[in-house]
Structure formats: C-alpha cells, structure tokens
Image (cartoon, helix red, strand yellow):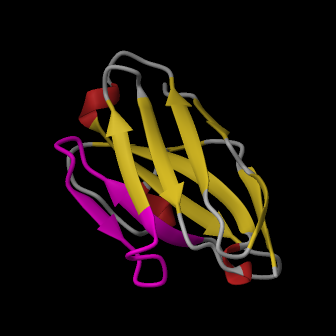
Amino acid sequence: QVQLVESGGGLVQAGGSLRLSCAASGRTFTTYTMAWFRQAPGKERESVGFIQWNGGTYHAVSVKGRFTISRDNTKNSVYLQMNSLKPEDTAIYYCAARPGQFGSTSISDYDYWGQGTQVTVSS
C-alpha cells in the first residue's frame, strides 16, 4: 500500500512558477513509476508526465520545456517544477504511482493517487 500526499499548490500570476511536491509512504518507493496528472474544470484528467525508477522522464507536449518532473528516492518524494505558467495550466494536480519500471500516460495504469492540490494561474 502506498499513500501519496501532494503539496505546493496555490495562486500564481501568468508567467510565474510553482513547485509541487508529492510525499510517498512505503519502503518500495524506488520500484514505482511516479506520475503527475491534472484535471481542469469541466475537462477530463490528463497526463502531465511521469518519471521512472531510473530517472527517465516523459513530459506531455503541452508542458514540455516549461515543467520538469524529478524525484528524490532518499526522501520518497517526487516533484513537479512548473515555470512560465499559463492560465490554461489551472487545474487540480494529482500525484500517482504504479509498481514497476515502465511509465504510462493512462489513468487506469496507476494504482495509487493523492488527494490533489489546486493550482490557479491568473492572467
């Protein structure tokens, strides 16, 4: 069982930055692929990207070059650094985990989810 707790959301002006954190419980954190998803009002949840156990990453086209996913296995944590934020980045951001070394952009492939943290970008 893995429990995930996100933090770091808030209100920021367009062009600003935020760093989200996700703390995971459990001793096998290093064997999990970690991901970030987001859900904007009235829209479906979508993948932001993921990071594999070995540090390999994938970032969605919509955030590539602006967002960076990283992890610190010594702290059982994964991070989402968000720069050059746009109003369309406004959403609830979720951390997710799946056992194994291969990443996925599919919601159904993830077994564990955090409660989400709100990110609001004003224009």
Looking at the image, residue 15 sits to the left or right of residue 11; the answer is left
Counting every numbered tag in the picture gives 0
Judged left or right of residue 115, residue 25 is left
Q: Position of residue 39 (x, y in %)?
A: 69, 69
Indicate whether 110 appears above or below 48: above
Residue at 47%, 76% in the rendered image: 63
Residue at 25% from the left image edge and 49% from the top image edge: 52
Please name the residue shown 55% across and 37% down the image: 22
Which of 40 and 15 lies nearest the eye of the viewer? 15
Compared to residue 105, the image places residue 62 above or below, namely below
Q: Residue at x 44, y 53 (%)?
A: 35
Which segment is the magenta one? Answer: 46-67
Establish if 44 lies above or below 16.
below
For the C terminus, which image quadrant? bottom right
Answer left or right for 105 relative to 122. left
Answer with left or right where residue 21 lies relative to residue 104. right
Residue 53 falls inside the magenta stretch: yes
Q: Residue furthest top?
A: 27
Residue 58 position in % (x across, y down): 30, 66
Residue 59: quarter of image: bottom left
Image coords of residue 32 (percent x, y): 31, 38
Q: Residue 48, percent across and down?
A: 49, 68
Q: Is residue 26 magenta?
A: no
